């Protein structure tokens, strides 16, 4: 009988531990990462071409 009373007391104490108010849960907004397309710039093409032309001119001049 003592075990039954003890189990009832523990279950009553445990159930009040979970009691709370009906507050809305806090939900964080999802993080949206937008991928940008890498556009090639004109400088990325022209700089190596100009350097190549300079090297070619130096080689031809020698």
Image (cartoon, helix red, strand yellow):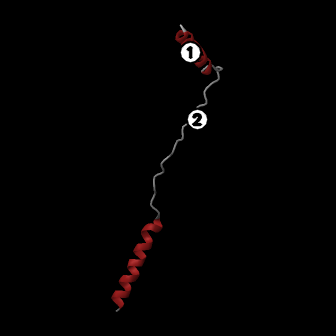
Q: Secondary structure at mark 1?
A: helix
Number of numbered labels in the structure image: 2
Mark sitting on residue 11: 1
Q: For the point 38% across and 87% down, which residue is it? A: 58
Q: Nearer the viewer, mark 1 or mark 2?
A: 1
Q: CA distance from mark 1 to mark 2?
A: 34 Å
Q: For the point 50% across and 46% down, which residue is it? A: 34
Residue found at the far top of this picture:
1
Considering depth in this image, is 62 or 14 the residue closer to the camera? 14
Q: Secondary structure at mark 2?
A: loop
Query: How busy is the neighbourhood of tag 1: few (under 14 within 10 Å), some, or many (20 plus)?
Result: few
Measured from the top left, where is residue 56 in percent x and y? 35, 83
Query: How busy is the neighbourhood of tag 2: few (under 14 within 10 Å), some, or many (20 plus)?
Result: few
Considering depth in this image, is 1 or 51 the residue closer to the camera? 1
- Name above or below for residue 32 compared with residue 48: above
Measured from the top left, where is residue 1 in percent x and y? 53, 7
Q: Dividing the image into 4 quarters, which one contains the C terminus?
A: bottom left
- Residue 44 quadrant: bottom left
Measured from the top left, where is residue 36 in percent x and y? 48, 51
Mark sitting on residue 41: none
Q: For the point 44% across and 71% down, which residue is it? A: 46
- Residue 60 quadrant: bottom left
Residue found at the far bottom of this picture:
62
Considering depth in this image, is 51 or 28 the residue closer to the camera? 28
Residue highlighted by disc 2? 28
- Name above or below for residue 19 compared with residue 30: above
């Amino acid at each position: 009988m003592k075990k039954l009373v003890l189990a009832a007391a523990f279950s009553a104490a445990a159930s009040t531990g979970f009691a709370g108010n009906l507050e809305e849960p806090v939900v964080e907004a999802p993080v949206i990462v937008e991928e940008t397309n890498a556009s090639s710039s004109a400088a990325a093409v022209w700089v190596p071409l100009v350097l190549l032309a300079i090297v070619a001119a130096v080689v031809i001049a020698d």
